[in-house]
Structures are given as structure tokens and as C-alpha cells.
Amino acid sequence: MIELLKYVLTIMAITVSVGCSVAESKTSTQSTVVDFGDPNAKQFAQRLNSLAKNKSSHRVIKIIQFGDSHSAADFFTGEFRTLMQQQYGDAGIGWVTPVAIKGQNHTALNWKANDWSVISSRTVSDIDFPMGGYIAKTTKDSATIQIIPKSESNRNWQVKLTFKALKNTPNLLSIYDNNDKKININYLFKSNVWQTVSFVTKTPFTIKGGLDVEIGGIWLNLSQQSGVTVSSIATNGAKQSIWQKWGTDWLKELSSSKSDLVILEYGTNESFEETLDVNTYRKSLINSIRQVRKSLPHAAILLITPPDTMADENSFPKSFSTIMSIQKQVAKSEKTLYWNWQTAMGGPYSIKNWQNRGLARPDLVHQTLQGYKESAKIFYADFNNFIKNKR
């Protein structure tokens, strides 16, 4: 018996020291998407399963992920988008910022912008921000933004552009197609009110704005194409409370998106707060979920926890365990879907193992490009298992 015990312990030690693969880590930690009673989960799964069986149905499943820097690089969401579109069909990109944001990225899109400045809700308050919290503002007349998808195949795109007219001036907003031909767009002048204009074009297309126009988010869907879109609506350094900085009408924009699944990926920045107001954080998270439910009554909601994160080599951020606990409590009380990113990585302190394998950065907070891709693959596998089990 003693010899057998020694043998078992030896095998366990070897397993740990070798450095398990992501798939092995996933199996050992048994990460999964948990349904705490989301009222729309079954219908959402049925829509996806139906799409998988009939990709020519012209059905589009729209997924939005709101988040912080883990989402803002679009490495996690970009890989998830790719995997979902391989499985269910490519319906386009989804929501994007009006111009490139410094320090952020998009895996499916490039911008070429001249004579625009960016205002961010991360650093500015008391401005009527649209959904996403970014405004591109012209600095000269005839400023231009060229939108260039990275994988172009000469297809038509259905574009929805959010903008605000500050004055009723001529040539306020013009759109030109890939042949530099002006596209007819119709809108009524509404001073200082966010509104949208829709058009169909091939890419790259160009937006030209006068001095009295501001641009918000842009929706990019492939025209008459079934499949999935995955939008990353995120800001470096963001907390859940950033929504409170957005204008009063941004939820109307969310509602008009007709999204099928809303993912909330916040909590890492809150976990570093030395004096976290627990009640305020809980109320903010609950209120955010209820705002989504009111705006999108038929959408499922999924809460993603922060990934495994350490303040230094020996300790977690001050409020990390509190954030993790509250998020799970709220997922249960508000009946949402739930995915524990820390568990998927291998549990507490797994960020060190990921760093040793080149999957996490030295700050023990962020992951490398490959790390985010590996995280997305685990999430995609868990997500698909959930969808299949909801049949």
C-alpha cells in the first residue's frame, strides 16, 4: 500500500511539473457556463442550434461583450468571433469604435482617419456619450474616416452609423463607397441629438464630416448574410460604473441593436480598489443587468468573472475575492448565465503557470495574444457545450 501511494504521488508530481496544456487545465478544473436561471437562455440556445442546421436562413445572432482591457484588445473576443463564425456562419463584425483608439485593437478592422480627435468616457465626464463611450470629433472641415475590414471579399455591408449634428450646416455628413461615389443618405436635422443613418456599401468606404458633426459607434453587418456577429464594446481601465458616464439615451441604442446575448466582462479594475464600497458595487452590477433586461427583454445575459489575477508574486489584489464572490451572488440572484474565467485558467495562482508558458504578461494581470486566444478557446468550448445541452 505504501509503495502504491508513493507511485501515485510521483505520477501527480510529474503531471504538475510538466506543465499541462490548456485542454488538460480545462478538464482538471471543469470550467463550464453555468445557467442560474436566465429566462432567455433556452430560446437563445435554440436559435443558435437552428442557425447551425440552416445557415442560409438569413438569421443573424448578435452577441455583445461589454468589458475592460481584457476585451478592448479584441484578442479574446476576436478569437471567440472567429470560432463562432466558423461554427455558425459569418454575418460580419458588429459594433466598432468610430476611429482607432490608442492602446486598443480590433482583429477584424482597420481605420484611416484624418482630422479627428477622440473623446473617451474613461477620462471625461458630463458629456452626452453614446453607447460605447467614445466620440470622434472633427478638428477641420472635410475630416475623413476610412473603414477597412481586414478580410475583404467584395461583399455588401449593411452599415449603421451613429452621429450627432451640432449645427444645421451643409455637407455635414457624407458617405462615399469603395469607388469614391457618394452614397445617398437621408436624415433629419436634430440639433445635439444622437441619431443613426443606415446604408449598404462595399468596403472600404469613407465618412466625411464637417466641423459641426460628431461620430459615435458604427455597426458593420454583412448584407443578407446569416451567421453570428460578436461585438467588443470595451475600454482600457474600465469599471462597470463607466456606463453611468454615458448619455441617457445610450440604452435606446442598445435596444435597437436587437442583440441576442449580452456578456458583461468587468471586475479586474474594481478588484484593485483598496477601499471597495461593496454595497455600491453590488447595486451597480445589479442595476446594469436590469438595464440590459429592460432594453433587450429577449436577450440572454452572461456574466464573466475576471481571469486569475495577482497584485504581485505572492498575493491577489485587495478586493479580488470580494469581486468574485459578489459576481457569483448577483448571477444567482439576477438569474444570469455565469462563466468563471479564473477556474477556466486552472484556479487560483494559475496566472503564474500561464506566464511561465508565455500566455500571461509580467504584470500577472493581462494575457499575451496567445493567452487570450487560449482563454477564448476554453470559453468557446464551454459555451458550445452549454448550447448543445440546452436542446
Image (tube, rainbow, N blue to C red):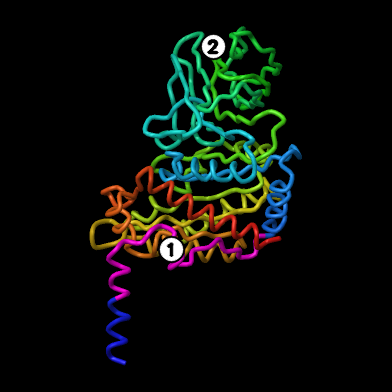
Q: In this view, does 371 lie to the left or right of 383?
A: left
Q: In this view, does 104 lie to the left or right of 206?
A: left
Q: Name the residue under label 1.
A: 343
Furthest-left residue in this view: 313
Where residue 66 appears, x then y in whole percent?
52, 44
Q: Is residue 365 left or right of residue 382?
A: left
Where residue 239 appears, x then y in whole percent?
44, 47
Which is more toward the observer, 259 or 351?
A: 351
Which is more toward the observer, 286 or 147?
A: 147
Which is more toward the observer, 128 or 5?
A: 5
Instruction: Tell me: residue 103, above or below residue 275.
Output: above
Name the amino acid, label 2.
Gly
Q: Which image quarter is the N terminus in? A: bottom left
Q: In which image quadrant can residue 18 be found?
A: bottom left
Considering only order in the chain, which callout, 1 or 2, is on the residue closer to the N terminus?
2
Give the magenta part as a residue range: 11-38
Mark 2 crowd level (few <14, some 14–19, many ≥20, 10 Å Cα): many
Q: Which image quarter is the C terminus in? A: bottom right
Where residue 386 appears, x then y in whole percent?
61, 60
Which is more toward the observer, 336 or 291?
A: 336
Q: Mark 2 points at which residue?
A: 210
Is residue 17 located in the magenta-colored stretch of the structure? yes
Per the model, the C-alpha gap separating discs 2 and 1 is 50 Å
Is residue 3 located in the magenta-colored stretch of the structure? no
Name the amino acid, label 1.
Thr
Mark 1 crowd level (few <14, some 14–19, many ≥20, 10 Å Cα): many
Secondary structure at badge 1 equals helix
Instruction: Tell me: residue 249, above or below residue 66.
Output: above
Instruction: Tell me: residue 41, above or below residue 170.
Output: below
